[in-house]
Image (tube, helix red, strand yellow):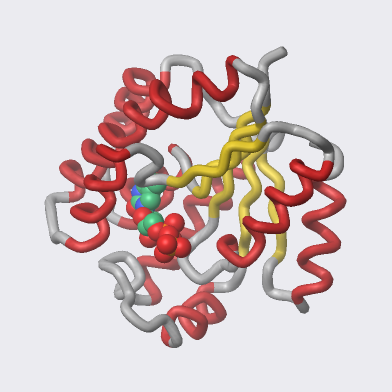
Amino acid sequence: MRGKFITLEGMDGAGKSTHIPHILDHFRARGLEVVSTREPGGTSLGERLREILLHEAMHPETEALLMFAARREHISEVIEPALARGAYVVSDRFADASYAYQCGGRGVDFEKMRLLEQWALDDLQPDITLLFDVPVNVSLQRLAKARSPDKFEQEGADFFTRIRDAYLRRAQQYPHRFRIINSDQPLEDVIRSLDRIISSI
Ligand code: TYD
């Protein structure tokens, strides 16, 4: 039986990284094979592209193209083989991040992004997307404490407001797969909401 493709999204500082180990443990405890991966990255080529993407300034469309180059490799090397053998693939970000960051944040044309998505993804879509959502000021407060912020984490409130809006628009557009987790509440409450969602996946 084909596995499940679960993606985690949210702007920087939304708390996604805190919850990944818990999500993986949950599925493993059910005896499932779990593949934990991330974007940009997930393959040796992808991780090299990640270094460039997170640290070098470039044209927004170059950024989109490199994200999708890394993603194309990720799909054929990691995601598709794992799904085909029945694994649960948990990816820290996927194509929704390109709509949020490159279209929403940087202003890349939406139609160009759709073409890129059709081209690189074929019909692959996540089964479930967990969107960790916090107000922009909360995310900025958390990012202010980060030790060596990358290129994206150094952006300001306007950039993150556009990203949050773009994510929330996508969640409205694809309600069948998006689950929004309000991460602006005490950790135990976030975990409780998360558990309710992942126990039904
Ligand atoms: P992130 O997932 O936040 O990793 P970490 O927790 O290690 O900081 O970092 C990835 C960054 O890449 C994040 O700022 C969002 C950005 N990004 C895009 O701009 N577009 C994309 O398509 C993807 C996958 C990520």
Residue plotted at (20% across, 49% down)? 60
- Left-right relation of 83 to 146: right
Position of the C terminus, as image quadrant, is: top right
* Location of residue 118 with respect to 42 vertically, above or below: above
Front residue of 17 and 138: 17
Q: Position of residue 53 (x, y in %)?
A: 23, 53
Quadrant location of ligand 1?
A: bottom left
Answer above or below: position of 29 versus 111.
below
Which percent across, then down, holds residue 118? 38, 20
Which is more toward the observer, 152 or 25? 25
Image spot of residue 4 (x, y percent): 67, 27
The answer to whether residue 75 is seen in the rendering is: yes
Q: Position of residue 72 (x, y in %)?
A: 33, 27
Give above or below for 177 relative to 187.
Answer: above
The answer to whether residue 167 is above or below residue 154 is: above
Q: Is residue 18 left or right of residue 92?
A: right
Residue drawn at (63%, 41%), measured in percent from left and top? Answer: 129
**In the rendered image, is residue 173 in sight?**
no
Dividing the image into 4 quarters, which one contains the N terminus?
Answer: top right
User: What is the total number of numbered labels drawn onto the structure image?
Assistant: 0
Residue at screen point 83% across, 70% down: 189
User: Residue 121's image quarter?
Assistant: top left
Q: Residue at x 27, y 30 (%)?
A: 112
